[in-house]
């Protein structure tokens, strides 16, 4: 049995027997229940994207996911957002930019950001904002941006903000209320189907609200249950939409987070191949070693990625690369960001969840090795697209 801090995809037999099947059925069910009003808002947005030539038109399901995101974030953060002054949001945004610009001061800036973010952004608002208008949406996006936790999501939601700016008050009110109701229904169904995978979350949050106070990752570790479901759903949607391009590429690379490594890390014999660290499979007990050896048999290289913040640096090297696909492996909460980032950089990709989280940086003082479902990874790299899937992807 694996340790479970916030979520685990493992069942009592210690494997992820039914998780991916449950997620597939859940996603099908949510997509099949999309009602006419939701579809009409999403279609209006797609027309706007096309007319304004904002980006190459993506699939209906990807835009539906973003509409749902607005509803979920409205539930979780609009109360805090409406109670936070603009000057505070701007100050935190500036600090976040400085952190990226001056990595040598990252640790110091993060300490300061942690304190200020808690003092300025955490208003302990349980109620949601009733400003169902452009100002309310703008305030929410500024808050999300100030937290530094939703960078890729905010990039996409800014297009929705531009769309909303052109709409009248009645349209906007109906639009935001619909997104909120969609989020409510989504969470209700997710609790029923996927709730068993996040059973420990409530207990963790009872302590994390105080234990992580003033820490830079306070808002990250306190992401709510519905955001776990949202990330799971998003990963499934993105995997389905991106599969067609993924299978076309001749080369595949798996990116494995070092939190999967057998401890202590000082014994690791991974070597650089000139680009990144490659596992030498020095230990049968190391989860990275196990995955790397299996992938090697299929001609696939596995690289070690020390932390999600290094993921961005790594990705830039593969921007617009036509013949290589990446398979990102991350814990549930990092999946939307990683998936969107690869998509923005025009990298063909798929993603696989870590079965549970356990890194030292965020979740456990000592840290313990995380793992993934090797069968799921094999399925992704080996499985050719079926007729039904290729039809759905056209
Ligand atoms: S198996 Fe690979 S990742 Fe694990 S300790 Fe050895 S070299 Fe490092």
Image (cartoon, rainbow, N blue to C red):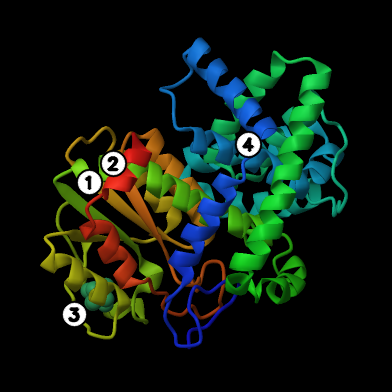
Distance from mark 1 CB to nearest ligand 1 atom below 8 Å? no
The residues bearing labels 2 and 1 have C-alpha atoms spaced at a distance of 6 Å
Q: Earlier in the sequence, mark 1 or mark 3?
A: 1
Q: Earlier in the sequence, mark 1 or mark 4?
A: 4
Q: Secondary structure at mark 3?
A: loop
The residues bearing labels 4 and 2 have C-alpha atoms spaced at a distance of 24 Å
Few, some or many C-alpha atoms within 10 Å of disc 1 (few <14, some 14-19, many ≥20)? Answer: many
Q: Secondary structure at mark 4?
A: helix
Q: Read off the residue under disc 4.
A: 67
Q: Position of residue 326 (x, y in %)?
A: 28, 49
Q: Read off the residue under disc 1.
A: 247
Q: Which mark is residue 244?
A: 2
Q: Position of residue 241 (x, y in %)?
A: 39, 41
Q: Secondary structure at mark 1?
A: helix
Q: How many marks?
A: 4
Q: Which mark is residue 282?
A: 3
Distance from mark 3 CB to nearest ligand 1 atom below 8 Å? yes
């Amino acid at each position: 049995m694996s340790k479970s801090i916030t979520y685990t995809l493992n069942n009592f037999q210690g494997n992820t027997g039914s998780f991916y099947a449950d997620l597939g059925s859940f996603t099908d069910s949510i997509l099949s229940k999309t009602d006419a009003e939701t579809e009409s808002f999403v279609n209006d947005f797609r027309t706007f994207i096309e007319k304004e030539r904002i980006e190459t038109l993506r699939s209906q399901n990807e835009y539906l996911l973003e509409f749902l995101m607005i509803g979920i974030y409205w539930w979780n953060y609009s109360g805090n957002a409406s109670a936070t002054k603009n000057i505070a949001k701007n100050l935190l945004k500036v600090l976040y930019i400085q952190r990226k610009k001056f990595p040598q001061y990252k640790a110091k800036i993060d300490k300061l950001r942690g304190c200020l973010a808690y003092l300025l952004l955490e208003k302990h608002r349980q109620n949601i904002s009733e400003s169902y208008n452009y100002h309310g949406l703008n305030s929410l996006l500024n808050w999300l941006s100030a937290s530094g936790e939703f960078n890729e999501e905010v990039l996409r939601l800014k297009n929705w903000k531009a769309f909303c700016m052109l709409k009248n008050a009645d349209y906007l009110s109906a639009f935001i209320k619909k997104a909120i109701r969609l989020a409510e229904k989504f969470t209700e169904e997710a609790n029923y189907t996927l709730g068993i995978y996040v059973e420990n979350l409530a207990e963790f949050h009872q302590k994390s609200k105080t234990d992580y106070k003033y820490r830079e990752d306070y808002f990250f570790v306190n992401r709510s249950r519905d955001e776990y479901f949202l990330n799971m759903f998003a990963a499934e949607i993105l995997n389905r939409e991106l599969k067609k391009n993924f299978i076309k590429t001749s080369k595949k690379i798996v990116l494995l987070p070092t939190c999967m490594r057998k401890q202590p890390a000082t014994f690791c014999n991974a070597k650089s191949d000139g680009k990144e660290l490659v596992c030498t499979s020095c230990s049968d007990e190391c989860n990275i070693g196990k995955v790397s050896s299996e992938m090697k048999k299929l001609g696939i290289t596995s690289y070690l990625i020390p932390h999600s913040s290094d993921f961005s640096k790594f990705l830039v090297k593969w921007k617009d690369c036509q013949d290589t696909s990446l398979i990102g492996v991350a814990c549930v909460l990092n999946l939307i960001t990683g998936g969107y980032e690869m998509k923005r950089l025009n990298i063909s990709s798929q993603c696989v969840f870590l079965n549970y989280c356990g890194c030292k940086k965020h979740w456990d003082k000592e840290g313990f090795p995380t793992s993934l479902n090797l069968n799921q990874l094999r399925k992704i790299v080996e499985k050719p697209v079926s007729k039904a899937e290729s039809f759905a992807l056209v």
